[in-house]
Image (cartoon, rainbow, N blue to C red):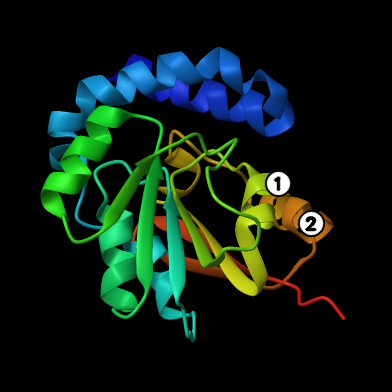
Amino acid sequence: MMLGRRLARLATNVVVRRPRLWPIFRPVIRRQFNQIAPVWDAMRLEDTFAPYEGALERIPGPVARALDVGTGTGQGARLVAKRFPDAEVIGVDVAPAMLDEARRLAPELTFVEGDAARLPFYDESFDLVANANMIPFLDEVARVLKPGGRTVYAFSAGAETPIWVEPEMLRRELERRGFTDFAEIAAGRGVAILARKAIRD
């Protein structure tokens, strides 16, 4: 498990700075998450999704279509559906074994195999794109999010999260891509960043 945490931190640190290197890490990360899928939910603590939920509570809506990136066993997607019961909620993940668990736990939701670096969705097709403990592929988030839509990046244990990006860096990179209305939410052991994609004039 410690090796997996170190790999996640290494991959995050490298890919955030050099996204083109993600294909080197992708097969290893996929294999790792396929292997731990049956026990993934049991590994989480009670407050793992506290910052994620805190950020969702700050979104006024309406949300017609939402995407949970790196959904794993679908916990994030289920929380989005609970917060926005009228929304079409889709979870996407690179690990098929994780998606098998997600479909078993929430057959009413849609789960799609896909790479966060090349999301299999049309431009400007979501009102909300949420990420819990995910390497940020910000260009893709900006591409699939509608103007005026919101994105969430939540890290369950703050700087101790294996996949962790400094909030200041996230904010700076999101601003470069036309995001505004930032909020930082602290909850449980973690933190989340909420931002809104600017509406074009």
Q: Mark 2–mark 1 contact, CB under 8 Å? A: yes
Q: Residues within 10 Å of mark 2 (few under 14, many from 20)?
A: some
Residue type at numbered disc 2? Arg
Q: Which mark is residue 96?
A: none
The answer to whether residue 24 is left or right of residue 18 is left
Residue 20 image position (x, y, % from top left): 71, 23
Residue 161 image position (x, y, % from top left): 43, 40
Name the residue furthest right.
Answer: 201
Residue 190 image position (x, y, % from top left): 42, 55
Residue type at numbered disc 1? Asp
Viewer-nearest residue: 135 or 5: 135
Q: Residues within 10 Å of mark 1 (few under 14, many from 20)?
A: few
Quadrant of image for the C terminus: bottom right
Which residue corresponds to mark 1? 139
The answer to whether residue 132 is left or right of residue 139 is left
Which residue corresponds to mark 2? 177
- Check disc 1 and report its element: helix, strand or loop: helix
Task: Please give the name of the residue rendered at 32% of the width and 80% of the height, measured from the top-left corner.
Answer: 86
Q: Quadrant of residue 136?
A: top right
The answer to whether residue 75 is left or right of residue 143 is left
